[in-house]
């Protein structure tokens, strides 16, 4: 069985294929940055990983797993992954 991280990385590559998905992910990324920085924390790889961990934990507790379509949770999760790539580089 593939890990959730592998699923998200694969789906992250799909974002670039659709301007609409890219725009939606941009909005999610901005919201995540606002949440982290609004709580007084710097936007770092650690704070993004912590946010991702908490977000995905709640999603999975509700029975969520990435499906074929980009739902709200998948857009948010892939936006976080993209932000992590940006901050880490």
Image (tube, helix red, strand yellow):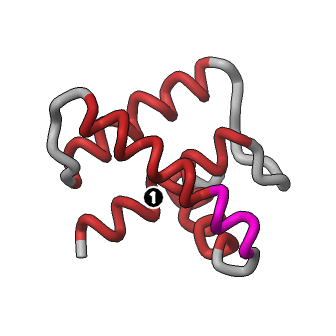
Quadrant assignment for the C terminus: bottom left
Question: Where is residue 14, by image quadrant?
Answer: bottom right
Looking at the image, the residue that sits furthest to the bottom is: 17
Label 1 belongs to which residue?
81
Which residue is pictured at 24% across the width and 68% down the height? 88
What residue is at 62 percent from the left and 68 percent from the top? Answer: 10
- Secondary structure predominantly adopted by residues drawn in magenta: helix
Q: Is 6 above or below relative to 63?
A: below
Q: Is residue 30 above or below residue 20?
A: above
Residue toward you, 20 or 51: 20
Q: Is residue 30 left or right of residue 18?
A: left
Residue in the foreground of this view, choosing between 89 and 57 = 89
Q: In this picture, which residue range is highlighted in magenta?
A: 19-24
Secondary structure state at the residue bearing disc 1: helix
Residue 73 position within the rendered picture, expressed as x and y whole percent measured from the top left: 65, 39
The residue that appears at 60% across and 27% down in the rendered structure is 60
- Could you tell me residue 29's position as x and y percent? 47, 52
**Left of 64 or right of it: where is 85?**
left
Name the residue located 22 percent from the left edge and 54 percent from the top edge: 45
Q: Is residue 47 left or right of residue 57?
A: left
Question: Are there few (<14), some (14-19), or many (20+) residues within 10 Å of tag 1?
Answer: some
Determine if the magenta segment contains residue 20: yes
Q: Is residue 62 above or below residue 78?
A: above
Q: Is residue 12 above or below residue 25?
A: below
Q: Is residue 23 magenta?
A: yes
């Amino acid at each position: 069985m593939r890990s959730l991280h592998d699923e998200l990385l694969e789906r992250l590559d799909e974002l670039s294929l659709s301007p609409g998905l890219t725009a939606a992910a941009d909005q999610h990324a901005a919201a995540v940055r606002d949440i982290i920085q609004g709580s007084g924390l710097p936007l770092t790889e650690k704070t993004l990983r912590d946010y991702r961990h908490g977000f995905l934990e709640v999603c999975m507790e509700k029975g969520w797993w990435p499906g074929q379509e980009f739902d709200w949770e998948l857009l948010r999760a892939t936006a976080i992954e993209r932000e992590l790539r940006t901050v880490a580089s």
